[in-house]
Image (tube, coloured by chain):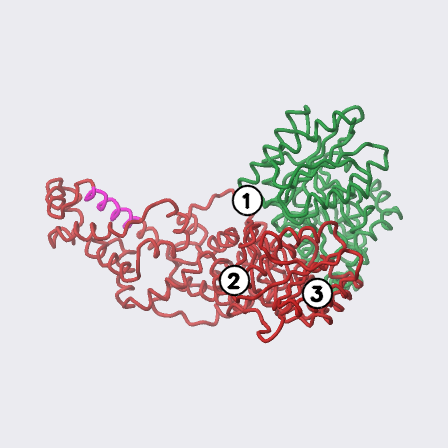
């Protein structure tokens, strides 16, 4: 436990956790009131505590199955390790949540971007998740690192989508490639890759149209986009990121499952975490499908995108209590 | 359909109850646990789930079991009634200002679908109420938001009022209203920027716009995939603006859409429309009654229950049930049963109303003519043959005679014999599942063949408190 203790009690983590809780204050008292009372009133672990924990996890949209599993695991751990004080329980929660998230693996929130090749990152997701804005933020991150970034308008369907990406590309100083509205998105990707080859682009960020995962034709279209990219550049797309709105409930799991079947998802971007929603479904996604979270969106400004940090996220969920 | 998953779950949980003669407190408890879990998995707000199951349980416990009604079906009915109650009893229409300009404000989080829905609504009201709509672009923040609304306006041939991104939305709204009055528009739909419900400055902007427009309707656009947070979002918007209605979007997805349930219960905001696709004509009036049925997936069971009780003599039915259970089911009963079903309407329709059947019958063609043929075949049997089913089953010459007498083929006669046998053995099984003779777990296994792999999961869930 020592190693984790050092990790978690580090002031920096707790300070950073602040950003995950922005806005939570309003609902925080309602949600956490009982837990806080229970923790404050007694230093001993009572059974009610687990019930309160369950509530908090459910309210955070962590999937029911994952919550039940996790809380059962906590109970067991408390029993086996003979943990009696609530202070130790707090540490245990963070530690076990961390373990649940990373499993035995090394989880990196960095993208697979390598020098000396054209790196392709494909962004997919349902309508309104925040794909276009996220792409702009990621472009900004890599332009700051002196990479040459190309933003590709693969959403040829939604009214104004091409224009929206174009405006962003101007703001962040990225190259921009688009064809007319209504063009076949696969052909847009094909031409964009040629553009990248001719203009020594380091990173291509591909926007795609929002699609609900149960729309078979749209998912086939995505499959084709993926295939065309892979045919033009071996091993591409190097990253396929599923953009998930933090307000999303259990449907997030269905999104991850089905998108993952069509185009192997390498990571999640959790957007709009600056609201009151906690986006806990991504933990269920990690638990069930082993897809890590790469980024969290924390606002509308171009800098409001952060690499995901599980400890900060958990502290954010319990801020004010721990 | 969006609620398929929730209905599957409820069907599974209720299957244990349907088909039972008596309902114990344990049964109800068990069922409520399943209902709770399935509602939570459907994203129904956790508080709503609590109050919902509590209410249903109390009603189920208190209610006298009606003669002739399966107690399980009665519980189903209570669940359905409660769902309906939560979502509002009937569809609420929009308030329109018929003497002057109706103005409608679209509000919501980023990415909920306000702009698309604004277009859909304009189209809908132009058609249904013959109004002359003007779309107003008040989202000056998101890049190309105005562009998007303009494109939608072009597609619908509906003019869009916009003053670029340099003026304040409040003043654009004011000018739009003047423009509408001067140019004979009687409907304004204002598309505001998506914003977080906790962003005070942005929420104040909406208050200002509201003051300018004095809208008849302030509609909250809510993504049907929203989880537990739906209630926070709706409450905050409502507190600041007094929302008059909600539009649930992206219901053409596979989301279970529990937000619909939560919304009305906690905030009292009626859901007025639902978005059913990306095309601009895919907006439907929200119908709580229909939605409740849809959530259950088995909602039509209620109609079936009503029909059964309306059309059938109760004693007749009980006698039939007894016979079925005892395995003494013969062709006379078979035809009686057919006639009962016929009374209730088409076979396909009835089948769809039976939980689980809807799925089982998918693809299978139910031909009402078959009923006529079966009647003819049974009609060609002697009285003895109808009563003693073995006679026909054991003699091929009898089968040939019946076939030629009814004008059907021998293989059709064989099929009838088979289906009677099947029914008999199925009924026998059900009869032996009397709760006093068997524990409910094995009864359930026998009936639905529930996969045992779920067992571990179920065990865990029992510990779950909800």
User: Which residue, given by chain and number where applicable, does mark 2 sit on?
Assistant: B127
In the displayed structure image, the side of residue B329 where residue A116 appears, left or right: right
Q: Is residue B361 left or right of residue A15?
A: left
**Image mark 1: chain:** A
Q: Residue furthest bottom?
A: B99
Q: Nearer the viewer, mark 1 or mark 2?
A: 2
Taking the image as drawn, is residue B227 in sight?
no
Q: Which residue is mark 3?
A: B176
User: To which chain does the residue with label 3 belong?
Assistant: B
Where are the magenta residues, as a range?
A: B412-425
Image position of A121 with respect to B25: above or below: above
Q: Residue B188 — which label? A: none
Q: Secondary structure at mark 2?
A: helix
> Helix, strand, or loop for circle 1?
loop
Q: Quadrant of the N terminus of chain A?
A: top right
In the rendered image, residues at marks 1 and 2 fall on the same chain: no
Which colour is chain B painted?
red
Front-lying residue, B285 or B290: B285
Q: Mark 1 or mark 3: which is in front?
A: 3
Judged left or right of residue A284, residue B310 is left
**Residue beneath disc 1:** A214
The residue that appears at 27% across and 50% down in the rendered structure is B424
Residue at image point 61% right, 74% down: B100
Q: Is residue B23 magenta?
A: no
| Residue B136, x across and y down, in percent | 68, 61
Rendered location of residue B360, percent (x, y): 39, 47
Local crowd size for mark 2, using a 10 Å CA cut-off: few (<14), some (14–19), many (≥20)? few
Where is residue A223, by image quadrant?
A: top right
Q: Colour of chain A?
A: green
């Amino acid at each position: 436990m020592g190693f984790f203790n050092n990790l978690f009690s580090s002031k920096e983590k707790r300070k950073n956790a602040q950003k995950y809780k922005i806005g939570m204050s309003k609902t925080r008292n309602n949600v956490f009131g009982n837990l806080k009372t229970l923790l404050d009133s007694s230093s001993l672990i009572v059974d009610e505590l687990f019930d309160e924990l369950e509530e908090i996890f459910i309210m955070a949209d962590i999937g029911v199955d994952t919550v039940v599993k996790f809380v059962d695991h906590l109970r067991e751990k408390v029993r086996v390790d003979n943990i009696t004080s609530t202070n130790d329980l707090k540490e245990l929660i963070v530690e076990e949540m961390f373990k649940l998230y990373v499993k035995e693996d090394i989880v990196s929130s960095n993208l697979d971007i390598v020098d000396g090749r054209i790196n392709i990152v494909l962004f997919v997701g349902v309508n309104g998740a925040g794909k276009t804005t996220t792409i702009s933020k990621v472009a900004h991150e890599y332009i700051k690192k002196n990479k040459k970034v190309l933003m590709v308008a693969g959403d040829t369907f939604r009214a104004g989508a091409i224009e929206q990406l174009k405006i962003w590309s101007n703001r962040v100083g990225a190259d921009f490639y688009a064809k007319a509205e209504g063009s076949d998105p696969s052909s847009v990707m094909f031409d964009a890759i040629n553009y990248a080859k001719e203009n020594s682009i380091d990173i291509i960020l591909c926007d795609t149209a929002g699609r609900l995962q149960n729309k078979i034709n749209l998912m086939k279209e995505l499959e084709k986009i993926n295939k065309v990219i892979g045919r033009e550049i071996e091993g591409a797309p190097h990253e396929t990121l599923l953009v998930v709105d933090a307000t999303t409930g259990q449907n997030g799991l269905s999104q991850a499952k089905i998108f993952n079947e069509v185009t192997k998802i390498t990571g999640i971007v959790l957007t709009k975490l600056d609201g009151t929603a906690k986006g806990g479904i991504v933990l269920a996604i990690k638990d069930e499908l082993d897809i890590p979270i790469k980024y969290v969106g924390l606002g509308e400004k171009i800098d409001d995108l952060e690499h995901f940090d599980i400890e900060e996220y958990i502290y954010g969920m319990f801020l004010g209590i721990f | 359909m969006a609620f398929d998953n929730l209905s599957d779950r409820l069907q599974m949980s209720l299957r244990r109850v349907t088909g039972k003669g008596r309902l114990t407190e344990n049964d109800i408890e068990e069922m409520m646990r399943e209902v709770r879990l399935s509602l939570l998995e459907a994203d129904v707000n956790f508080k709503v789930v609590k109050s919902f199951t509590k209410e249903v349980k109390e009603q189920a416990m208190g209610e006298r079991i009606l003669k002739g009604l399966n107690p399980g079906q009665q519980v189903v009915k209570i669940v359905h009634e409660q769902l309906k109650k939560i979502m509002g009893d009937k569809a609420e229409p929009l308030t329109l200002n018929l003497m002057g300009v109706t103005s409608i404000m679209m509000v919501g989080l980023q990415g909920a679908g306000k702009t698309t829905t604004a277009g859909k609504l304009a189209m809908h009201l132009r058609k249904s109420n013959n109004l002359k709509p003007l779309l107003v672009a008040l989202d000056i923040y998101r890049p190309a938001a105005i562009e998007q609304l303009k494109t939608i306006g072009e597609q619908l041939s509906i003019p869009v009022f916009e003053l670029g991104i340099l003026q304040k939305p409040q003043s654009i709204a004011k000018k739009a209203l003047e423009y509408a009055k001067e140019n004979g528009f009687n409907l304004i739909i204002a598309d505001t920027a998506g914003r977080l419900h906790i962003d005070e400055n942005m929420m104040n902007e909406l208050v200002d716009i509201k003051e300018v427009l004095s809208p008849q309707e302030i509609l909250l656009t809510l993504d049907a995939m929203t989880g537990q947070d739906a209630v926070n979002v709706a409450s905050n918007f409502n507190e600041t603006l007094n929302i008059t209605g909600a539009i649930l979007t992206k219901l053409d997805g596979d989301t279970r859409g529990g937000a619909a349930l939560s919304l009305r219960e906690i905030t009292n905001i009626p859901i007025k429309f639902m978005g059913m696709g990306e095309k601009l004509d895919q907006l439907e009036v929200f119908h709580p009654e229909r939605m409740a049925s849809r959530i259950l997936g088995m909602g039509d069971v209620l109609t079936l229950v009503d029909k059964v009780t309306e059309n059938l003599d109760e004693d007749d039915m009980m006698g039939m049930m007894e016979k079925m259970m005892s395995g003494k089911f013969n062709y006379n009963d078979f035809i009686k049963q057919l006639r009962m079903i016929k009374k209730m309407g088409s076979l396909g329709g009835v089948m769809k109303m039976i939980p689980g059947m809807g799925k089982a019958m998918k693809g299978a063609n139910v031909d009402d003519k078959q009923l006529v043929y079966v009647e003819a075949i049974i009609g060609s049997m002697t009285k003895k043959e109808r009563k003693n089913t073995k006679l026909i089953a054991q003699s091929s010459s009898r089968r040939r005679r019946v076939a030629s007498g009814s004008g059907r083929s021998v293989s059709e006669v064989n099929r009838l014999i088979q289906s009677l046998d099947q029914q008999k053995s199925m009924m026998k099984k059900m009869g032996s599942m009397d709760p006093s003779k068997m524990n409910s777990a094995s009864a359930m296994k026998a009936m639905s063949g529930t996969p045992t792999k779920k067992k571990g999961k179920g065990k865990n869930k029992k510990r779950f408190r909800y």
